[in-house]
Amino acid sequence: MEGASNVRGAVLALLAMGIYATHDVVIKVLGAQYPALQVLFFSSLLSFPLVTLIVMRDPTPGTLRPVHPGWVALRTVVGVVSGMGSFLAFSHLPLAQVYAILFSAPLLVTILSIPILGERVGLHRWAAVVIGLLGVLIVLRPGAQALQWGHLAALASAVASASTAVILRKLGRAERPLVLLMWPMLGNFVATGASLALAYRPMELPHLALAGVIACLGLIAGFLLILAYRAGEAAIVAPMQYSQILWATAYGWIVFGEVLDAPTVLGAAVIIGSGIYIVWREGRGGNSVNRPVIASRIRAETVTAPRTSLLQRIWPPRP
């Protein structure tokens, strides 16, 4: 019975990752015609009613005043950076290259969990982190190619996503999920709204509709991922995130005419292998007390694709 549940969880996670990849493809399509932060602004604006309906179900009484304002402010900043960085990266880089860089987030979670969570990291996981970060260098291949703003944006998104994950683990249930979702949403509106003064291009109605599609796809994928974690073990479901590289390869070739180069393939393989090894080590227990990577459910956060761990707390399973 447990095996069947794990299979169901894995299948749901694979479907969620396919929808997330489609979400990112639409970002790239619109990002080729409009400023990336403008796309993020309108996608966020159109996702706001949907997210509001969800957060209104938050069963925890209270207000939007945070219990730990410093940590919530930091979580807001890194949440905004994560979303802006991913939208910029997808707009300017090949899909597979963006995913390869974003996949470094679990490695960064392992590092950040030491000072923030007091996590013990043994030799095996340190070795996996170092090897994984070497994989990032293989993908970036500094000196062999000119680094673009898209590369820096992807790296910033990975660091911010990892920071968000560790901060949420640090806060635990001390803050309402509503607080942890709404403040980054408000921060996002301020930041992306301000960017419209710097670069703005009127959007055609079909393209505005695509911005709404981004919002819908992000929330659908998020709920599928929640179902996946409820059905299967986290150590089985978590590695399914790496299937996005397959979707990216297919979409990149079919839609954008992108072809994977050898450094991206090699670097992605090294990063994914390191990430899976860390998940496996955490799943076995060992020195990991908080299991920050497994518990974080890594995915670059945007308002259109909020943290599934927070959504799950708002949308508890039926008894």
Image (cartoon, rainbow, N blue to C red):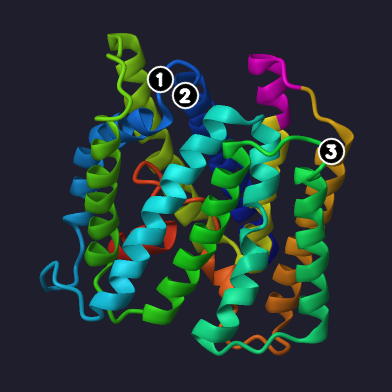
Residue, disc 3: 144
Is residue 168 placed above or below 67 in the rendered structure? Answer: above
Viewer can see residue 317: no
Q: Earlier in the sequence, mark 3 or mark 1?
A: 1
Is residue 95 placed above or below 136 in the rendered structure? Answer: above
Residue 255 % position (x, y): 63, 15
Which residue sits at x=63%, y=60%? 238
Q: Magenta part of the protein: which range? A: 249-258
Residue, disc 1: 34
CA gap, disc 2 to disc 1? 5 Å
The overriding secondary structure of the stretch rendered in magenta is helix
Which kind of residue does numbered mark 2 sit on? Gly
Marks 2 & 1, CB-CB < 8 Å contact: yes
Residue 115's label in the rendered image is none
Q: Secondary structure at mark 3?
A: loop
User: Circle 3: is it few (<14), some (14-19), or many (20+) Cα within 10 Å?
Assistant: few
